[in-house]
Image (cartoon, rainbow, N blue to C red):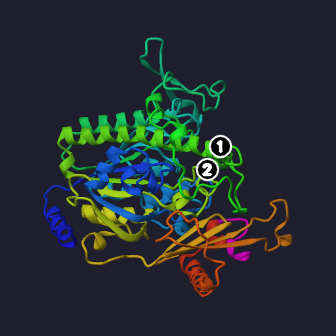
Amino acid sequence: MVLLCTVSLNSFAKKAKKPNVLVIYTDDHRYSGVHALGGQAVRTPNMDQLANTGIVFENAYLMGAFTGATCVPSRAMLLTGRQLFKLDGVGRSIPKEHTTIGEAFGNAGYNTHMVGKWHQDNPSLARSFDDGACVMSRGVYLVDHWRMPLWDWKKDGDYKKKEGWLLEYDENGKEVKRLVDLKNDKRGPTGTEKDGPHTSEIFARNAIKFINEYDEKDPYFMYLAFHAPHDPRQAPKKYKDMYPEDEISLLPSYMPQHPFDNGHLFLRDEELGPWPRTPEVARKHLSDYYAIITHLDAQIGKVIAALKESGQYENTIIVFAGDSGLGVGNHGLLGKQNVYDEDGVHVPFVLSGGAIKEQGLRLDAYCYIHDIFPTVCDLAKIERPASVTGKSLVPVINGEKDKVRDFTYHAYRQHQRAYRKGDYKLLEFVKAPDKDWKLGELTRGSRTTLLFNIKNDPWETTNLAFLPDYFDLVKTMQKEMKEKAIELGDSNKNTKEQYDFWDFY
């Protein structure tokens, strides 16, 4: 298998024309949210095809977040190739000195284009791409896939709230475009498939339009950022009907509630369902999650079909990745504000397309979302910007190395840390002190330690930390985790938190 890998990439490198690059980024999409990866009941034939005809990175992770909106730093890490503690604050802004992936490909002679969700500042959006379509998240959000405010691409980056628009069906079923009514358009979710097209349909359609109309000699780089399967987990009825709630199987880490205070239990994502998370509640959320993923999969399939029909597929690298995991009932959690694998940090990452000749190659080397940028640069034979801190996975793909990382380290705000090395993963939780107290009055608070054998227990269900046989391992990993924190720059000076996890550890 390694020999096949090396030969195909050498052949790939000899092509006269540089490959197109299509980055497909999904939202709140955990590793097991792709059937071919996690083997769960969700149906994802098109994502499965990408995995089966490409390279799957089985241990790809989000490093963490310092905001409940984990998609903000996730996207910042993807776009800059910089690790969590090297972002500007929580990642909402990308300073000019942090070269984006769009800029890097633009500087290498690519035409650059974006479609969909952008969670960073307007100046970084404007400088990252030559053009784009239907930009999301420019100031108005109605919490509704059927009524999503969008903006026309503006090269100057000057997006105004009043310029956001919706696509709706008129009485004849024809799509009409109207400006958002800032006073009267109420926040949802209240829309249905009768109101207008779904965000996944809109974004896929615009990506297909770009593909079909592209006639330039230079290659292109397209960033296609879907909002699905982020809540509200809405999908057309035919997709929801694929997953009867009473037939949904609960996953191994299902719990009616989280067994202790993880520091941030009460926030928007966790309030999407009642406590306790009864089996009925968990099944409903899983049914909705699977339905919106399958609908998303169908739209991705249309984009891939357009590549093939246009003749561009054979010279295109497709990067498919998710921005974070999601609880959806695991460990009693619904959101992604945690450092468990499937619930928060384990994500799909696949390299596929006609320019990647490997068939079903699976690699278990540790990697992060911010390693995607340098990896794709190396595959496309373009220069990696000096501001990138991620590591290229091409040596692993080529069979030159087994790994480029010995461990993974994860952080969620000032509450949680995790350290994975070998078969084991250490998780540490510090209960947040009362926010009304002054800093000088804070006490250490409570602390919880978990240890899992991820190889034997991938759903993190059996805590080993309290067993005497593992005391020495826990102490060793705690020591190493603290050393890695210092090495990586994990402190409140970098993350601008009110106080630091390590002050109370």
In this image, 29 relative to 6: left or right?
right
In this image, 443 relative to 235: left or right?
right
Disc 1 marks a residue whose amino acid type is Leu
Q: Residue 272 carries which label?
A: 1
In this image, 145 relative to 44: left or right?
right
Residue at mark 1 to residue at mark 2: CA–CA distance: 7 Å
Query: Considering only order in the chain, which callout, 2 or 1, is on the residue closer to the N terminus?
Result: 1
Q: Residue at x 40, y 54 (%)?
A: 39
In this rendering, is residue 180 above or below 388?
above
Q: In the rendered picture of this protein, how many numbered marks are placed on residues?
A: 2
Q: Which mark is residue 334?
A: 2
In this rendering, is residue 273 above or below 383?
above
Q: Indicate the position of residue 187 as horizontal and vertical percent values.
A: 64, 32
Q: What element carries label 2?
A: loop
Q: Magenta part of the protein: which range? A: 496-505
In terms of depth relative to the viewer, which is nearer, 112 or 256?
256
Q: Is mark 1 on a helix, strand or loop?
A: helix
